[in-house]
Amino acid sequence: MSNFTQQGNQEAKILKGSEEKKNKPDATNKASRPKKKKPAKPASFKEFEALAMEIVEANGGSYYEWLHKQHQEIILNFNVHNQKQITEVAKHS
């Protein structure tokens, strides 16, 4: 058998093996990954969200702009509170 034929046979085996791997479910990887739990919204969340939206918009504002500002405030307060740790991490990076 020539080297060319042997090489062709080896390539065919490799391709066949990779196709079989693609078609098999990878149960070991799925079993080892823990499922992330989606945080549950508190009871009556949607009702309070709708009421907050009505109040903000009744005062001439945008609910989503207001919500965005609330998010920014949380982040800024967190950064100020943890400034020392953030500085240390930045120094080591």
Image (cartoon, rainbow, N blue to C red):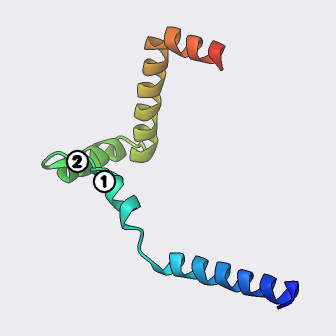
Amino acid type assigned to the residue bearing label 1 in the image: Lys
Q: How many marks?
A: 2
Q: CA distance from mark 2 to mark 1?
A: 33 Å
| Mark sitting on residue 35 | 1
Residue 15 position within the rendered picture, expressed as x and y whole percent measured from the top left: 66, 81
Local packing at callout 1 (Cα closer than 10 Å; few below 14, some 14-19, many 20+) is: few
Q: Residue at x 36, y 47 (%)?
A: 57
Q: Could you say whether the residue bearing mark 1 is in a helix, strand or loop?
A: loop
Local packing at callout 2 (Cα closer than 10 Å; few below 14, some 14-19, many 20+) is: few
The residue sitting at the front extreme is 1
Q: Could you say whether the residue bearing mark 2 is in a helix, strand or loop?
A: helix
The residue sitting at the left extreme is 43
Between 54 and 6, the residue placed more toward the observer is 6
Amino acid type assigned to the residue bearing label 2 in the image: Leu
Q: Which residue is mark 2?
A: 51
Residue 71 position within the rendered picture, expressed as x and y whole percent measured from the top left: 42, 34
Q: Residue at x 63, y 15 (%)?
A: 92
Between 13 and 42, the residue placed more toward the observer is 13
Residue 69 position within the rendered picture, expressed as x and y whole percent measured from the top left: 45, 33
Q: Are marks 2 and 1 in contact (CB under 8 Å)?
A: no
Does label 2 or label 1 sit earlier along the sequence? Answer: 1
User: What quarter of the picture does the C terminus occupy?
Assistant: top right
Q: Is residue 49 above or below residue 29?
A: above
Q: Residue at x 43, y 19 (%)?
A: 77
Does residue 36 appear to the left or right of 8 in the view shown?
left
Does residue 39 appear to the left or right of 4 in the view shown?
left
Corner quadrant of residue 87:
top right
